Image (tube, rainbow, N blue to C red):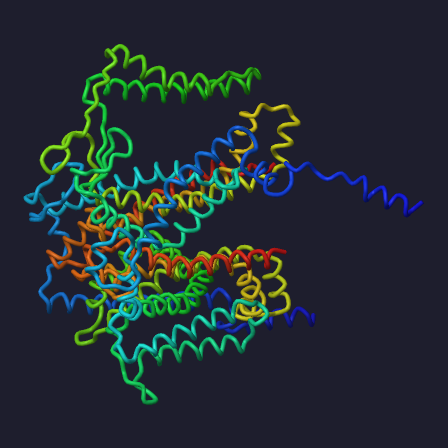
Amino acid sequence: MQSKTQITNETDAIKPPITSIGVIGWMRTNLFNGWFNSLLTIIVIYLLWKTVPPFVRWALFDSLWVSDGTACQQTDGACWSVVTANLRFIIFGFFPHDLQWRPLLAMLILIALLFYSRDRKRWKKSLGYTWVAALIIMGLLMKGGLFGLESVESSKWGGLPLTLLLSVFGLTAAYPLGVVLALGRRSRMPAIKTLCVIYIEMIRGVPLISLLFMSSVVFPLFLPEGVTVNKILRAQVAIILFTAAYVAEVVRGGLQAIPKGQYEAAEAIGLNYVQTMRLIVLPQALKIMIPPTVSVLISAFKDTSLVVIIALYDLLKTTQSVLSDPKWMGFSAEAYIFIAFVYFICCFFMSDYSRRLEKELAT
Amino acid sequence: MKTDSNHTNTSEVIPFWNDPSKRALFYQIGVLAMVGCLSYYLISNTIANLERQAIATGFGFLDRESAFEIGESLISYSAADTYGRALIVGVLNTLKVSFIGIVLTLVLGTFIGVARLSANWLVAKLSAGFIEVFQDIPILLQLFFWYAFFYEMLPSPRQALNPITGVFLSNRGLVFGIPADHPAHKYMAIAFAVACVLVYILTRWARKRQALTGRIFPVGRTSLALLIGLPLLVWSVGGFPTAMNMPKLGGFNFEGGLNLSPEFAALLIGLVLYTAAFVAEIVRAGIQAVSHGQTEAAMSLGLRKSHILNLVILPQALRVIIPPLTSQMLNLTKNSSLAVAIGFPDFVSVAGTAINQTGQAIEGVALIMIVYLCFSLLTSALMNWYNKKMVLVER
């Protein structure tokens, strides 16, 4: 009896029609369901066919990868040589040529640590200490002057290391400041609350570029005579002050999500303000805040490109100065596409990570 | 007895450093004193520095002759005008690019956001790719790219690209044909404004009547008819003027038509594409926030498709969409300050020139901050007003 039903099941199992499975079925459900979608698909395919093959021909088949500028002028394709021939300058700027292994090593440490920290299981106190140590080592590698490393003036820092430095140190320093500002904004003391609200709203209301202008032209006036602060540090301060206001809003969002009962329970067991925040509220709030923090990090990373306007040699500026060389004039598209790709890779990894975290943290 | 004494004891014994209200006062005075000292230190340094470097202070420079030209301006301006007028030209240019940018961004962003949710796999994936790519590239880099696109990649006006009749792309910018001047156009604009007012009155009346009597008035169709019909009527009265002011190649550049400079076009394209990517994400999230059960419930109530959209989906989706959308619009306005990098004379760029010429950096940067703060405060005021209107009424 049982075997019989099994047999009939096997033989009678009717296969779905060929038009609803496999490639054809997939196309029918996803591309050609209804006349409107079919029309849309055909139009899109036509447009792609018009644009993609010429682009591929320009970027790959007709392109030059290693040549000089004059050879590039003659070809119809892309001149990637503008990137390959100037890669070291684009990435490291004016950093002394034979010492460029140092920023490279610093960047590798940073990337390795970022990848290591991706896994939430590894977030322990020791990892925090590792980060602090790594940041110090990276700073040392850039600056030199100790342990037999040759000292390099910070005015020679440039390219990708500068971009990473401005964003990583910017966020590291902005984070604690942002937490303090957010706590101040939620404080019951009117004077402190007003100060924090004014600061946050004022910074969020103005463009970053006005703060950078301030750091480059107004800030020197604030200092007593004879004291000068180098340009990178001034821009870094502007970025920190700017990012802190955005971090503060993220933290405020996290704090608001903590139910009032948690505060009351903490008070009931006799914890004071600092203990309540450090042991009860912040650990819960910080967890909620991770995804929006990553998006603040992404925009901070993108915003560091604005230092071009005050003439710091970050990744964008080094590229531009390559393009102003008469030998390589006219290949902006290739050079800009290359650095756009660099920025895209970095931001894509971060936003992808933030989405994954959001899924993990969703309870 | 004992508890009583205890109570009095503790209330007397509380030292002032354990009294929360006094402690709060102490903290606040401390913080204010610190802020005060810091600002005193900075201000005194600044005054000393300004005196040493013999830099003038105050806003007197606003009345002086600016002596620099501005490439494009909405009001008449020449180098003989004052700094004040130059800055107004800058503000107007910022407002112009922001306003046009916001309108285009809303259209493109909504379109891509809806396309992202399309049942068509190809369209959905392409929109997702667009959103990801344009969000992840810094806006400044995009602006540089479009600027180089106009100056390096586009041909000279003689070989201008002509994708659609009447539209020319060249390294002198974007030129397109506009209807030739005709008195009827002015009256058409007036007719359109009148139609808008009529539609507003009609909507209110119809809503009131529906609330009172339950009878539904076809507001949508009547409004559409009014908005299109009234200007068309005026147009026909004016004698159907169809003459177009088409750009023609004359000498080295185009004559006639509407010409957008390469700087303006690059800025506009860059800002619109960048912000539209964010707007698309917001629109997608807003639509997805309305659960499918809402649509099904509305269907089971027997509502028509247009009513489902207007009465059930949109009011809920908009509540999610509007707040982040306003902040994106504000971001667009703030990002328009990057025009300074590609040479479009927006407010920051004009103020920067003024700072360079007069050396009055503090006043210049303060003006930049004040103007942008005004934009932000105005927007958030509007935003709060709208939020109050849209907030969930819980009973």
Q: Please state the horizontal and vertical placement of residue A55, each as a whole percent of the image.
A: 35, 48
Seen from the viewer's position, the closer of residues B344 and B133 is B133
Residue at the spot 13% in from the left edge and 59% down from the top edge: B359
Query: For residue B91, what is the image quadrant?
Result: top left
Looking at the picture, tell me which residue is in the foreground, A115 or B329.
A115
Which of the image's four quarters has the N terminus of chain A?
Answer: top right
Give the residue displayed 54% in from the left and 17% down from the top. B216
Foreground of the two, B101 or B42: B101
Looking at the image, the residue that sits furthest to the bottom is A148
Position of B345 compared to A249: left or right?
A: left
At x 47% / y 19%, what residue is drawn? B219
Above-or-below relation of B333 to A174:
above
**In this view, A337 is above or below A47:** below
> B374 or A60, which is in the foreground?
A60
Residue A188 visible to an observer of this rendering: no
Q: Quadrant of the C terminus of chain A?
A: bottom right
Q: Quadrant of residue A345?
A: bottom left
Task: Using the image, determine if residue B115 lies above or below residue A119.
Answer: above
Residue A124 visible in the picture = yes
The answer to whether residue B265 is left or right of residue A137 is: left
Identify which residue is drawn at 61% across, 34% down.
Answer: B294
Point out the residue furthest to the right here.
Answer: A1
The tally of labels here is 0
B202 to the left or right of B11? left
Query: Residue A66's quadrant in the figure?
Result: bottom left
- Image coordinates of residue A141 in percent, x first then y, are 35, 80
Image x and y of residue A273, in percent: 53, 68
